[in-house]
Amino acid sequence: MNEPCESPNGRLDWLKSRLQQAGHKATHQRLEVFREVIQTDAHPDAETVFLGVRERIPTISRNTVYQTLQFLVDQGYIAPFGIHQASHRYDRNTMPHHHLVCVCCGKVSDCTQSGLNLSHFAGFENWGRIDALHLELRGICSDCLSKQEIASS
Ligand SMILES: [Zn+2]
Ligand SMILES: [Zn+2]
């Protein structure tokens, strides 16, 4: 699969041609749901995607948006993140990566590492099958840090 290019319009064209190649319809609703996920690095949840798409398509139902998100995940165009589907957030970045999570404002940002693999971990050998390695680095983002500094000065 070719990697999507970075600009939102380029990625929409990419999705359109991928859908058509796969024999799926490139419907307006599918494209708008995809647009809502890829236009931000905020890793939005389904409800946030629904509210955003509804601004452009007032008649769209919550159910349609949720089903479309699941379709886009099943096809590998976006990545889910979170364990339970009800609390999934959606990630435009489908390459392996890790997340920085602000415990103050909940902001989620991407980060990468190189050279980390299962040999750096212990205690999982008899647990079962490992399918993915995803780290969450928690802390306080620079926006929240500067607000705290203002509040305490
Ligand atoms: Zn923050
Ligand atoms: Zn991410």
Image (cartoon, helix red, strand yellow):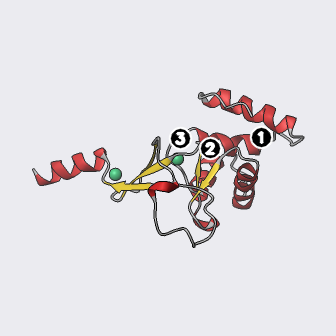
N-terminal label among 2 and 1: 1
Q: Nearer the viewer, residue 53 or 152?
A: 152
Asked if residue 134 shows in the view, the reply is no
**Crowd band around label 3 with a 10 angstrom C-alpha radius: few (<14), some (14–19), many (20+):** few
Q: Quadrant of the N terminus?
A: top right
Disc 1 to disc 3, C-alpha distance: 19 Å
Q: Which residue is mark 1?
A: 28
N-terminal label among 1 and 3: 1
Q: Nearer the viewer, residue 119 or 98?
A: 119
Disc 3 to disc 2, C-alpha distance: 14 Å
Asked if residue 4 shows in the view, the reply is yes
Q: Nearer the viewer, residue 86 or 33?
A: 86
Q: Which residue is mark 2?
A: 94
Residue 145 percent across, percent down from the top left: 24, 49
Mark in the foreground, 2 or 1:
2
Q: Name the residue at the right extreme.
A: 23
Assign a secondary structure to mark 1: helix
Q: Looking at the picture, does residue 87 appear above or below residue 119?
A: below
Q: In terms of image quadrants, where is residue 10?
A: top right
Residue 104 percent across, percent down from the top left: 33, 58
Mark in the foreground, 3 or 2:
2
Asked whether mark 3 lies closer than 8 Å to ligand 2, one says no
> 77 left or right of 25?
left
Assign a secondary structure to mark 2: loop
Q: Name the residue at the left extreme.
A: 153
Residue 15 percent across, percent down from the top left: 74, 35
Q: In terms of image quadrants, where is residue 152?
A: bottom left
